[in-house]
Image: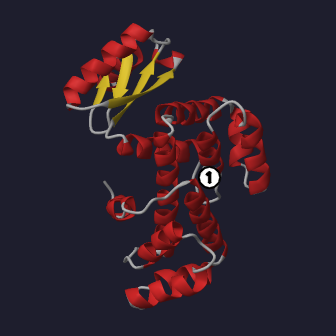
Amino acid sequence: MKSRDVALSAFDPVVDAIQVDAAAADELFAVVDLLEEQPPLRRSLSDPSASSEDRQALARRLFEGRLGAASLSVVVEAVSRPWSSGRAMIESIERQGVRGLLRVATARGELKRVQEELHQFALLIESSPELSDALRNRGRSLADRRALITRLLTGRVASVTVVLALRAAAPRARTVPLALTNYVALAADLAGEKVARITVARPLDTGRIQRLRRALEARVGGPVLLLIEVDENVIGGMSVDLGTHVFESTVAGRLDEVRRLLN
């Protein structure tokens, strides 16, 4: 895990003591957008030459009375920490907004649904060059890209899924699918799950999915979230990526290995 990721995840237990609901998450996203648009303010709130207390006092002067108690607490705690950069600081704030929404989905009994919908939307974007180009095109305004996402998802997926998909279109995100995949990983972490990315040539039936899940859970010693992608290029078999472990049993994978041996 990269040092930046370690710092971001180390902030999670601090915020877990704060009740970040959907309204607080929306306020955190608004703070992120403001700090993204105002580099001097972002630098002031993350200035390593200022004391933690001074940065917290500045955050209170800026946001007290404008934010609810929960979101203000998150921001004040965030600015007190020694982030590597202002962007790392705002990334930490946005992460807590995302985690707050995922907890809302959990309370509604919708976390699994949201995970699957985020995963499927990421696959849809990656499989459609036109959609991928439309969401990647920085010549289109953020409002236009988000309007496209809204048209595609509203009424078809959970409300939390829509909000998270809209956040994934933020300018700082490298790609929408990557942001969505990161959200799925955060959801799995909240649920205490390992993420297994499965690539197969043809869809798996329910029985095979259940057997695969049991086998992987026995291997890792805990619950596993299966993210299944159908890719005809694998020819046959299955590829399983468990993060630190990759199990390759596809025909395409074996052919690639033969080619490497012959070259």
Question: Picture coordinates of residue 152 (x, y %)?
Answer: 73, 35
Question: Picture coordinates of residue 254 (x, y %)?
Answer: 34, 17
| Rendered residue at 68%/47% (across/down) | 136
Q: Is residue 139 visible?
A: no
Q: Which residue is mark 1?
A: 167
Circle count? 1
Report which quarter residue 207 is drawn in: top left
Image check: 95 left or right of 34? left
- Up the image or down, 48 lies above or below 106; here it is below
Dividing the image into 4 quarters, which one contains the C terminus?
top left
- What kind of element bears circle 1? helix
Instruction: Tell me which amino acid carries mark 1.
Output: Arg
- How does the figure colour the protein chain or chains? secondary structure
| Rendered residue at 29%/31% (across/down) | 223
- Up the image or down, 223 lies above or below 94; here it is above
| Rendered residue at 64%/35% (across/down) | 125
Image check: 166 left or right of 53? right
| Nearer to the camera, 245 or 56 | 56
Question: Picture coordinates of residue 145 (x, y %)?
Answer: 75, 48
| Rendered residue at 47%/32% (across/down) | 112
Question: Picture coordinates of residue 119 (x, y %)?
Answer: 53, 33
Task: Using a 10 Å C-alpha cutoff, classify the residue at mark 1 as few (fewer than 14 neighbours), some (14 to 19) or many (20 or more).
Answer: some
- Up the image or down, 53 lies above or below 131; here it is below
- Up the image or down, 205 lies above or below 38; here it is above
Q: Is residue 16 visible?
A: yes
